[in-house]
């Protein structure tokens, strides 16, 4: 189960410094000299990834935990959404609900991260979390470094437009746009479900203007 969760956190879509002489451009290392320093996956509340990272980074400095907790990584990219009213830029996390932490596991380090506000636990079972393999960490690095610096999404619909929903639980439904939230990459669409008008919030990528 732990291995399946770890793989899910690193598979295709929610770090460490590059291996010396192999990935010098990376900000993190997959391997460090101390074999007890490994990368782990931390579960967080969705939307709290950056807050958790900031809280742990701050505590590492304040409590002098640099010898136990080395790096935290929230793989993400900038997404620019363009609408007729202008454009906005938001930070899109690759693996919502996950933060990668490079640390030496001890009662102090594990307990501190686990008690950080927004953290719900570690991937793993038993008394200690399960570390990622170097190969799994490298998958994350390849995704982060392989992305274009910024993705752009063009929104060709606006409020009151009729749209078709192309994916998700409401795929093949049509509806009317009530609001567009470009800063969140979301829109609110009024659809008819079982004869009743229902407002649903969708990703902009799930909607296209009816032709």
Image (cartoon, helix red, strand yellow):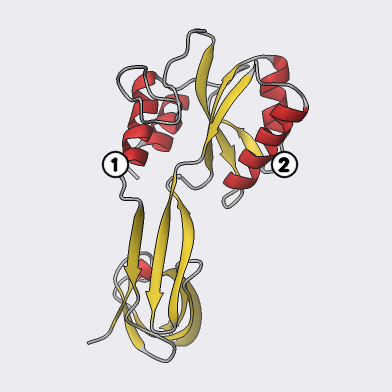
Compared with 103, 85 (above or below) is below
Q: Residue at x 44, y 25 (%)?
A: 17
Residue 74 drawn at (x, y percent): 50, 41
**Circle 1: element type:** helix
Quarter of the image that includes the C terminus: bottom left
At horizontal 31% and vertical 46% (from top left) the residue drawn is 147
Examine the image and state in which quarter residue 81 appears.
Answer: bottom left
- Residue at 66% in and 22% down: 110
Q: Quadrant of residue 61?
A: top right
Camera-side mark, 2 or 1: 1
Residue marked by disc 1: 146
Front residue of this view, candidates 123 and 88: 88
In the shown orientation, is residue 53 left or right of residue 136?
Answer: right
Mark 2, residue position: 117
**Badge 2 or badge 1: first in the primary sequence:** 2
Q: Residue furthest right?
A: 63
């Amino acid at each position: 189960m732990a291995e399946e969760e770890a793989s899910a956190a690193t598979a295709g879509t929610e770090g460490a410094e590059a291996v010396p002489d192999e990935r010098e451009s990376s900000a993190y290392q997959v391997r460090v000299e101390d074999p007890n320093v490994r990368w782990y996956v931390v579960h967080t509340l969705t939307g709290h990834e950056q807050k958790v990272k900031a809280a742990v980074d701050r505590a590492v400095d304040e409590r002098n935990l640099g010898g136990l907790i080395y790096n935290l990584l929230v793989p993400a990219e900038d997404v620019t959404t363009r609408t007729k009213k202008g454009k906005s830029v938001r930070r899109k996390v690759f693996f919502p609900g996950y933060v990668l932490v490079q640390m030496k596991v001890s009662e102090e380090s594990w307990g501190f991260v686990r008690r950080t506000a927004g953290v719900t636990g570690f991937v793993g079972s038993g008394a200690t979390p399960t570390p990622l393999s170097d190969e799994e960490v490298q998958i994350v690095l390849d995704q982060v470094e392989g992305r274009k610096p910024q993705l752009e999404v063009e929104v060709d619909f606006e409020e009151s437009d009729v749209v078709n929903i192309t994916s998700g639980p409401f795929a093949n439904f049509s509806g009317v746009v009530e609001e567009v939230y470009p800063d969140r990459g979301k829109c609110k669409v009024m659809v008819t479900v079982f004869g009743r008008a229902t407002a649903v919030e969708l990703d902009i990528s799930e909607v296209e203007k009816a032709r």
